[in-house]
Amino acid sequence: MSSLFPALTGEARTPGHPALRFGDRSLTYAELSAVTDALAARIRDAGRVAVWATPTLETAVGVVAALRAGVPAVPLNPKSGQSELGHILKDSAPTLILTAPDAELPSALADLERVDVDVRDRPTSRPALSDEPAPTAPALIVYTSGTTGPPKGAVIPRRAVATTLDALADAWRWTADDVLVHALPLFHVHGLILGILGPLRRGGAVRHLGRFDTGAVARELSSGATMLFGVPTMYHRIAETLPTDPDLAKALGRARLLVSGSAALPVHDHERIAAATGRRVIERYGMTETLMNTSVRADGEPRAGTVGVPLPGVELRLVEEDGTPLTAYDGESVGEIQVRGPNLFTEYLNRPDATAAAFTADGWFRTGDMAVRDPDGYVRIVGRKATDLIKSGGYKIGAGEIENALLEHPGVREAAVTGAPDPDLGERVVAWIVPQDPQSPPPAAELASHVAALLSPHKRPRTVHYLASLPRNDMGKIMKRALKTDEAG
């Protein structure tokens, strides 16, 4: 396999071309090559290295240096608690931690050798680096959210990073001329692999905002940035701001590509952004274990509510509960997504039982995500098998389509849908609503009729809870397990 970063090894671009920018701090490709050369030489015998993954230049440099050294990197979420950090350190056994010099590390990391990343380091002579590791060699160990137990470390091979980024380059027409702007966290696949390693593999540039701000997005898209990556929470804020911010609308209209991921973007927000900017947000679908599986293509139809078609090299099928593949894709039949291809992780670290359970005998990965597929191949996610598939009155109902319907009601700001045990129906549909006006929420009967009219009567919510806000994780995903135990209302 060729280098993950050709532009850092003289295979592409000019040395003075911008590579990374965080706020007012930046590195050209020549500078990034020099500083990562020096750090890679220092850590090449380290085994595994942890990275204190703050949204900083040092995090990006640390991860790239580890990859250039052939050393697996373990990104750590700075918001993780002591118990979670302790578990990850014990499980992954890194020999040191890479961090920004001014970072205050928690006591859980006290026994780990600390290496401060100096982004100004320039070796007087080029240190010799190891040969490019095998495609199957581990690149990163990324820990899952651990909703049903301690987080599991997904071992992501170099092959998966390269093939995913190249498949996205094909789907998005991503080139060295693109400048990406985002404000995503750097401890996860979206912000780190797509948002930092993606531009560097292409020889393009990335501008990280540090924290999300619509004004900063407008500034960057008005000064040369061509692509924006975000999560639905960010695009929702953009949609809310657009009516009173013509500069933001103009800036978004200049973008070549607006991409949303990590959770479903409500159709209502799709339409508001398109109406104000003339640009449609495209969605893609992936997981920690699979990196990216599907995307709406830059030259395809940006169909709101779908995650596009399988990426080059990715096999995708929908299966019934007994594992039987669906034989016809009609846009209505719900099945679990299974995928196969070079984009997959190799194992859960130290968890052969979990690894074996995640795959079928013939190598398909069980995603746990439920979807329907249109006759032309477009995939529409309807929810997680564990939390979003509701079996009510003999029907299989996906929570996602009901949430989109609820968000079309003018009195609804945010919505989530879950199932609850019901003696008659098996499960009933439960809606969790953040109203536009907390003093005058839309009546439950009105919401039920609204959904029944848009979708069908059996999909209407039978119970409605009203909340001040929905519980979300760092990536903006709604934590539905918390809703199921929350009796507020």
Image: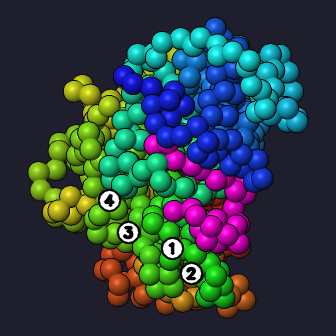
Q: Which residue is mark 2?
A: 250
Q: Quadrant of residue 425?
A: bottom left
Q: Is residue 262 above or below residue 76?
A: below
Label 4: which residue?
297
Q: Secondary structure at mark 2?
A: helix
| Contact check, label 4 and label 3, Cβ < 8 Å | no
Which badge, 4 or 3, is on the more N-terminal residue? 4
Q: Earlier in the sequence, mark 2 or mark 4?
A: 2
Q: Which residue is mark 3?
A: 305
Q: CA distance from mark 3 to mark 2?
A: 24 Å
Q: Nearer the viewer, residue 318 or 23?
A: 23
Mark 2 belongs to which amino acid?
Lys
Figure quadrant of residue 128: top right
Neighbor class of circle 1 (other Cα within 10 Å; few <14, some 14-19, many 20+) is some
Residue 311 can be seen in this image: yes
Residue for badge 1:
254
The kind of residue on which mark 4 rests is: Arg
Work out whether residue 269 or residue 160 is closer to the camera in this orientation and state it. Answer: 160
Local SS, label 4: loop
The type of residue carrying mark 1 is Arg
Q: Residues within 10 Å of mark 3 (few under 14, many from 20)?
A: many
Residue 73 sits in quarter: top right
Q: Residue furthest top?
A: 45
| Between discs 3 and 1, the one toward the N terminus | 1
Sequence-earlier tag: 4 or 1: 1
